Image: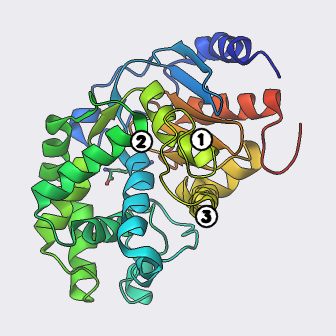
Amino acid sequence: MADLQAILNDIHAELSPRLGEGRVADYIPHLAHIDPQKFGMSLITVDGAVHRVGDSDEPFSIQSISKVFTLTMALGKHGETTWNRVGREPSGSAFNSIVQLENEGGKPRNPFINAGAIAVSDLVLAGHTPREAIGEIVRFVRYLADDDTIVIDPAVARSEEATGFRNAALANFMRAFGKLTHPVDHVLGVYFHHCALAMTCTQLAHAGLFLAAGGTNPLTGLSVVSSQRARRINALMLTCGHYDGSGEFAYRVGLPGKSGVGGGILAVAPGKAAVTVWSPGLNHNGNSLLGSLALEMLAARTGWSVFGPA
Ligand code: DON
């Protein structure tokens, strides 16, 4: 096997002159102040080897990466009926777009665009108060990462709650179509809080490892989902995980991946490893600019693309 630590060190060194490129998300005021020079990467293989470089152990706002975990929870709670509420097709639109919702009767295209993740939050809320649902999400992520120190950053959640007018529009629109069963403010409360989970690259790679290992966390031996479900979540990450940049990410990197506007990307190399990269500067699709490049370099150097060897 390639020397994975040397590969991470080389990627970090090669990207160092470019740190700060891209645009930090500032529509969530609390995220506008993040240092754009940050860069971290953690890679955990299915046999438990951990490789890290840069700011890999500094917590950052995972934002939309959390949508992978809430989808996993919703599928656990509601099984295939989840798909009555949200589709499985790429949107080809921005993550916060409202345009398709009207034509498509308030059913979001997929669980990773904001509208879809809000519908998933509604599913996770079933039978719970918002506080309980948020607690359940935190417990689930701690279980996945085998790390009880993971918390939500309440300042980020509040910052988004105060300014999330587009998400409020999406939620109200879906509610008007009868597609949300709980009050809009409850659903948005759950959504904003799971987006505000703060995690390090290493914690996120741990949490995503079950997707690289057929649904079971190979480090704890705990089963999370069936291998079929893990494969299907990976398929959705590949086709929808980077919004209208998903095709480009598949073309360049060739791995299932989920991005967040905090600048993180969780990528899955099935049978091999989970990898997280964090670099806050975003490209025009709202995906980490250098993070995508780092994963492109990693995939080229390991030959891990799901579409074939290098
Ligand atoms: O709802 C929002 O806009 C954010 N909480 C999450 C968006 C996001 O991370 C998009 N990812 N690239």
Residue type indicated by callout 3: Arg
Q: Is residue 261 above or below residue 278?
A: below
**Quarter of the figure that contains the N terminus:** top right
| Residue position for label 1 | 267
Q: Amino acid at mark 2?
A: Leu
**Residue at the image position 74 percent from the left and 43 percent from the top:** 252
The image quadrant of residue 111 is bottom left
Which numbered tag is attached to residue 13? none
Q: Is residue 91 above or below residue 96?
A: below
Q: Is residue 22 left or right of residue 193?
A: right
Q: Position of residue 51 (x, y in %)?
A: 60, 17
* Relative image position of residue 291 (x, y in whole percent): 57, 32
Cα gap from disc 3 to disc 1, whole angstroms: 14 Å
> Camera-side residue: 158 or 289?
158
Residue 231 visible in the shown view: yes
Tell me if mark 1 has few (under 14), some (14-19) or many (20+) residues whose alpha carbon lies within 10 angstroms of its own.
Answer: many
SS at circle 2: helix
- Give the CA distance from mark 2 to mark 3: 18 Å
Q: Which residue is mark 2?
A: 144
Kindly identify the residue that appears in the image at 35 percent across and 43 percent down: 141
Q: Which mark is residue 232?
A: 3
- Relative to 258, say whether 55 is above or below: above
Query: What amino acid type should be assigned to the residue bearing mark 1?
Result: Ala
Indicate yes or no: mark 1 CB to ligand 1 under 8 Å: no
